[in-house]
């Protein structure tokens, strides 16, 4: 299930699985559900990775209130539940709302994040001033009015993920107004109790830039107010107990491992002095170490200009290179999508893109011999889905994934007639078989070497006519003519 909060239209857009590029079938499994109050502004929605029910958690604030004053009935948490048949979607009669307000008086929350357990039965929320748990089955909201992750210093949460028993949260810790580095990035391993909503920190990792690095000059002043350049991202792999953390303000993605007692840094990758690498991170496979990184491009004054998605096929190291970058010549950007991506989410097989105009595009995995075409439909729909197209001759694809087809290496070929071939086959000996070959029917004996280099011609000597023209057109002497 895919859910988007569309605040401009005060409604939730819901797309039920299974997903298809057939527009009619997709529309039949899509609903737009209006908020139950036009004064609500929804910050985030959350679903379980292995969702077992049709409960959608969301939270936000009431609009039109003074941001600075601590007020009651400001921050709300809710559940949108679908109780109908999954095979025949009824958008008009089978949705119900349940909403509760965070008790107590609070000012506007600039930084608040939410996550659910694996099956989507309990939601956990984190802000600088409180944490909460919300159990769907009992409609029980528990709020702990303190920052239990950092009781002594202000901790601003930016991103969180949860594997069902342990969580990873990334944010900035306030060093105090007298510190040169006003806010420092910190990653915290924690557990949380649904009955008390108290988050218990287990282990933490503090980022510290080396003195010789360009990041050493950063102070992170202004991180307490929302700015896109400070966004972070977290994605847990519950199978390998590893986690990717993206901190785009330092242009770096980190890989950690975790246990019930420790959080350990394994490696990191940074493409150089810039900003935007790691705006989003997401695992594409829990078993194959495949993952995606959202890379944003900013101007020198932090104007967001475009985005790319780097896809990797092996464990993250400081020398990792992507196996594919989206968009590319084979997988262009859907014509109705903006080139600026706000977030990426995986299921993990499907990759979902959210752009800055509210557009959604879902890249579905394609089987061996096929690739996920991202051209999309000829009309604008939200969400739009990729389709499957066979690899063109001279290329191959040996996995079920969202990736592109890869050209055959020199000495191998693929004529494209057998879609089940997982790789290119060797060409016959002594045949012309270059990169991306479709056949090996030309013998090298039929070819001859041609030297294409041609000597550059020298200019001819000046002729007598040129002399006459030169002396006629130009005066040479001490007096004018």
Image (spheres, rainbow, N blue to C red):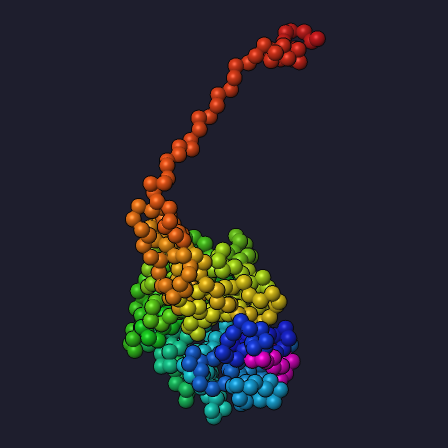
Residue 417 on the magenta span: no
Q: In this view, does 481 lie to the left or right of 88?
A: right
In the picture, the quarter occupied by the C terminus is top right
Among the 4 quarters of the image, the one containing residue 285: bottom left
Q: Where is residue 286 in the image (x, y as percent from the top left)?
A: 36, 72
Question: Going 44% across and 80% down the picture, which residue do you hit?
Answer: 48
Number of marks drawn: 0
Q: Position of residue 437 (x, y in %)?
A: 39, 51
Q: Can residue 207 be seen in this view?
A: no
Q: Position of residue 294 (x, y in %)?
A: 46, 63
Among the 4 quarters of the image, the one containing residue 185: bottom left
Q: Is residue 422 left or right of residue 23?
A: left
Residue 37 on the magenta span: yes
What residue range appears in magenta? 28-41
Q: Which of 424 and 34 is in front in this view?
A: 424
Q: Where is residue 165 in the image (x, y as percent from the top left)?
A: 36, 81
Question: Going 48% across and 21% down the picture, which residue do you hit?
Answer: 458
Question: Going 35% across and 60% down the picture, which residue do you hit?
Answer: 423
Q: Can residue 433 be seen in this view?
A: yes
Quick check: 265 above or below 64?
above
Quick check: 398 above or below 300?
below
């Amino acid at each position: 299930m895919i859910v988007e909060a569309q605040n401009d239209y005060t409604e939730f857009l819901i797309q039920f699985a299974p997903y298809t590029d057939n527009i009619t079938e997709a529309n039949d499994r899509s609903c737009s559900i209006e908020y139950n109050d036009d004064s609500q502004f929804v910050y985030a929605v959350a679903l379980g990775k292995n969702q077992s029910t049709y409960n959608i958690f969301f939270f936000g604030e009431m609009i039109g209130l003074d941001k600075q004053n601590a007020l009651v009935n400001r921050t709300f948490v809710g559940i949108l539940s679908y109780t109908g048949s999954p095979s025949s979607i009824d958008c008009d009669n089978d949705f119900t709302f349940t909403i509760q307000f965070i008790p107590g008086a609070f000012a506007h929350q600039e930084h608040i994040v939410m996550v659910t357990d694996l099956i989507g039965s309990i939601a956990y929320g984190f802000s600088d001033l409180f944490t909460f748990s919300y159990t769907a089955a009992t409609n029980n909201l528990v709020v702990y009015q303190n920052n239990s992750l950092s009781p002594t210093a202000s901790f601003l949460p930016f991103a969180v993920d949860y594997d069902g028993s342990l969580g990873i949260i990334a944010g900035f810790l306030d060093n105090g107004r007298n510190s040169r580095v006003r806010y420092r990035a910190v990653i915290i391993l924690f557990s949380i109790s649904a009955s008390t909503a108290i988050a218990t920190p287990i282990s933490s990792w503090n980022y510290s830039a080396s003195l010789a690095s360009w990041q050493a000059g950063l102070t992170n002043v202004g991180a307490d107010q929302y700015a896109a350049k400070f966004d972070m991202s977290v994605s847990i792999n519950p199978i390998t107990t590893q986690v990717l953390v993206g901190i785009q303000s330092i242009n770096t993605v980190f890989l950690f491992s975790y246990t019930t007692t420790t959080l350990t840094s394994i490696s990191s990758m940074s493409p150089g002095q810039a900003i935007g690498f790691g705006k989003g991170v997401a695992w594409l496979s829990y078993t194959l170490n495949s993952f995606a990184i959202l890379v944003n491009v900013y101007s020198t004054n932090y104007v967001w200009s475009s985005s790319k998605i780097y896809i990797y096929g092996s464990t993250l190291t400081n020398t990792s290179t992507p196996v594919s970058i989206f968009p590319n010549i084979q997988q262009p950007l859907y014509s109705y999508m903006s080139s600026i991506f706000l977030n990426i989410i995986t299921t993990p097989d499907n990759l979902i893109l959210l752009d800055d105009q509210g557009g959604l595009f879902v890249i579905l995995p394609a089987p061996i011999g096929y690739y996920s075409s991202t051209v999309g439909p000829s009309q604008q729909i939200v969400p739009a889905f990729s389709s499957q197209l066979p690899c063109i001759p001279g290329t191959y694809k040996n996995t079920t994934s969202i990736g592109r087809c890869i050209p055959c290496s020199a000495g191998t070929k693929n004529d494209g007639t057998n879609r089940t071939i997982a790789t290119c086959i060797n060409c016959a000996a002594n045949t012309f078989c270059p990169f991306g070959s479709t056949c090996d029917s030309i013998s090298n004996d039929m070819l001859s070497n041609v030297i294409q280099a041609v000597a550059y011609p020298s200019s001819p000597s000046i002729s007598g006519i040129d002399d006459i023209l030169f002396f006629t057109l130009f005066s040479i002497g001490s007096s004018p003519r």
